Image (cartoon, rainbow, N blue to C red):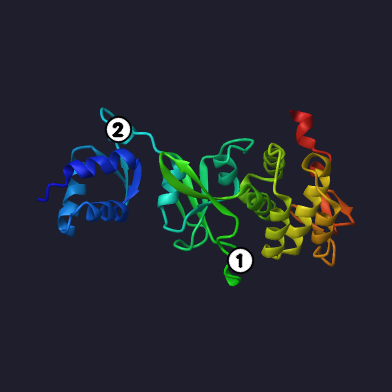
Amino acid sequence: MEKTSPSASVFFSTHPVFTTDEFEEFMRHRGSTNPRTRRNLLHYFHSQGTIFNIRRGIYCSVPPGTNPKACPIDSYLLAAKLAPDAVIAYHSALELHGRSYSMQNRVVFISRKYPAGHTFSFRGMRYQSVKSPSTLARAGRSDSEITSVDRSGQNVRVTTLERTLVDVLDKPKLAGGWEEVWRSLESIPYFNLDKVVDYALLLSRRKTIALVGFYLEQHRKELLVEEVQLKKLEEHRPSQPLYVGRSSSGKSGRLISRWNLVIPEAILERSWEESA
């Protein structure tokens, strides 16, 4: 066996969660030329309790003196390792940016690797894959408004706050519902509004564009929204009134003519504040 164990130990100390490919790439750069040796090393360290297999091709490093089955796992870092193109998004992006009103036992990430809605559960946390919006894919702009944050020395890709604002208004079910969306977004004191507008227009969904316009208009003073920004969005509002929420039947709503949206009274009146 090649004398690579010390190098492997260095890798484990700097990679709390890692993929087989990352480990093999690291060992190749350290002079390991035998693929079988690299695989055997993983099996050896796993048998020693130095690493723990989470699922096929993904491991976590076990701190010394820790039971492998009880070692802490960074759920965002794990989600980032589930696919090479993984991007933390929707409510999980709000959480990762420290701007969610509440926490969920679900991590949502964008990836082309899995079918839409694919889920994987580990230690009470559910990992859900969603597809990048088709309009972005067609335009070759799937990576629009994505940034990276550091998690234990490793980069985790996540949608920016500007994109996240638009995304959670576009798909509130992936963000915990309207109350959670409103409460979370209102904790963010600043957005680059030009980027918000540009991304909303790039997404090219009239209802979502109108919702973004409605939200910004509702928070015009706090966010320093300019009329020119609202007008850019207004030009792409739906041609006919559209209901926001469940459907045209059931919950009452009010037509907001500027945006051609029927907004539920619960949102307009912020009914959640009554129970706070």
On the picture, is 155 further left or further right than 238?
Answer: left
User: Is residue 255 depicted above or below 202 in this figure?
Assistant: above
- SS assignment at label 2: loop
Question: Which residue occupies 51% across, 53% down?
Answer: 87
Question: SS of the residue at dot 1?
Answer: helix
How packed mark 2 is, by other alpha carbons closer than 10 Å (few <14, some 14-19, many 20 or more), is: some
Q: Which amino acid type corresponds to the residue marked 1 in the rendered image?
A: Leu
Q: Position of residue 123 (x, y in %)?
A: 41, 39
Instruction: Tell me the residue that label 1 is attached to.
Output: 136
In the rendered structure, which amino acid carries the disc numbered 2? Pro
- In the picture provided, is 2 more to the left or to the right than 173? left
> Picture coordinates of residue 48 (x, y %)?
18, 38
Is residue 87 toward the left or the right of residue 42 in the image? right
Q: Earlier in the sequence, mark 2 or mark 1?
A: 2
Visible residue check, residue 46? no
User: Which residue does the numbered mark 2 point to in the structure image?
Assistant: 63
Along the line of sight, the residue nearer the viewer: 32 or 81: 32
Query: Which residue is found at the position 68% from the left and 64% from the top?
Result: 202
